[in-house]
Amino acid sequence: MKPRLISVFILVLMLFFASGACAEFDAQVVQQWLVSFTAETAQLNTRNDVSTTSDPARPGQYLLEYDFGTVLGTKTGQLLSDDILCVELTMPGREDCLGLQVGQTLEDIIGGREINAGNLPLYVLSTQESGYGWNWAYAANGSVYGVEYITYGGEPSLKEYTLTYVIAEGRITAIRLKVADATQAQAIEGQQTAEEIAQKQRGELLVAQNDQLELRKEDLTLNGRPVVGIPVEELIALLGEPQEIQVLPDGEGRMLVYGFCVAELMFDEMTGVELVRSLICVEPSVIGPRGVRVGMDAQEASGLLRCDNDVFSSGGMLYLAGEAQGLAPYGELIPGDAGQYVLKYTCRMSDDRIGMMNIGVTDGEVRHWRLSLNEEEEFAYGG
């Protein structure tokens, strides 16, 4: 390296590390590092013939191979920082913009922060206080296989800078820095996604993922006997004479009141038969669908029916199943006041009726469960 270039390079490094910015990942940190990186790399010989690395499918992109890894640039000559598309470090000895290198550990990246991703594929470690940017980990089967930093910046056009650490057996096996054109809408959407994930992480786990069967019409029982959609005579034969009979307003039917439950009736105009439309139970001794009981721990109750994702208390209405994958959700969580929420499950009955089970939870305990039919709304959950 020529003396003048050495002086320039050292000066750039001094300014970069003296700023202390390397402790955080943002666009300015990346831009400063790229200046120093290209100044140093210009003095190194490539291991390949750069002129032969042009990909016809990606015109204007050239791959340079070095002992430390590879650089993808937009030209074959000396690269400036604005010419960099991707830097990949695959050998120890070369530090990235955060001062890390291949061979260091996951602990060196996250600095003692605990990653408890559960069943979530992404775990947000931090978000930028100003501008757009975040840091998250990729996890599967209880282990982290990648950590990624994303930030936005640049003038006059916005750039997305992505720093990825590939992790295997707790160590960095590769470091990849990508630079791409971006829009503000893209940055805003990404930031919102990261903040939503972080909000879930801060919340309380309400329902854990499981592989139980979804709710079926055969499940809508009390003490193992069907109670929804049956004639009122069958209900009385099962439960006995009610303590009280009330007439619902506006001709909505009648209500049978027992000491342990309340049944709401409806008149089937097609058959002329009075049927049980809903039944709500508040008595711990009565067994509901799949064994649900009043007084049961909410975690145990929610594990009786299928749930494809972990569900947290943060946020608004959260689905219990994989609607994002195009599947019919097997239920939904409806938040209420502090410490209260309802787990709502649905199933197809007959004649396009919807069978429902609601489990009311307060302070982590089941306080009531309700079975019902809904004839008015279309069956929105498939099945």
Image: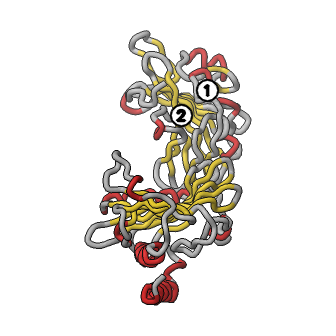
Question: Within 10 Å of the Cα at label 1, are there few (<14), some (14-19), or many (20+) other Cα atoms?
Answer: some
Question: In the image, what residue type sits under mark 1?
Answer: Pro
Numbered mark located on residue 330 in the image: 2
* Sequence-wise first label, 2 or 1: 1
Quarter-of-image position of residue 91 = bottom right
> Is the residue 171 above or below the residue 221 in the image?
below
Look at the numbered disc 1 and give the secondary structure of its residue: loop
Image position of 329 (left or right of 81): right
Point out residue 178 in the picture as x, y percentages from the top left corner: 44, 61
**Residue at the spot x=56%, y=33% of the render?**
357
Point out residue 102 in the picture as x, y percentages from the top left corner: 62, 65
Question: In the image, what residue type sits under mark 2?
Answer: Tyr
**Residue at the spot x=46%, y=71% of the render?**
128
> Is the residue 101 above or below the residue 225 in the image?
below
Q: Residue furthest right?
A: 285
Question: Within 10 Å of the Cα at label 2, are there few (<14), some (14-19), or many (20+) other Cα atoms?
Answer: many
Image position of 136 (left or right of 81): right
Q: Residue furthest top?
A: 271
Task: Say which residue label 1 marks.
Answer: 242
Any part of residue 176 in sight: no
User: Considering depth in this image, is 158 or 13 the residue closer to the camera?
Assistant: 13
**Residue at the spot x=67%, y=65% of the render?**
103
Point out residue 266 in the picture as x, y percentages from the top left corner: 46, 23
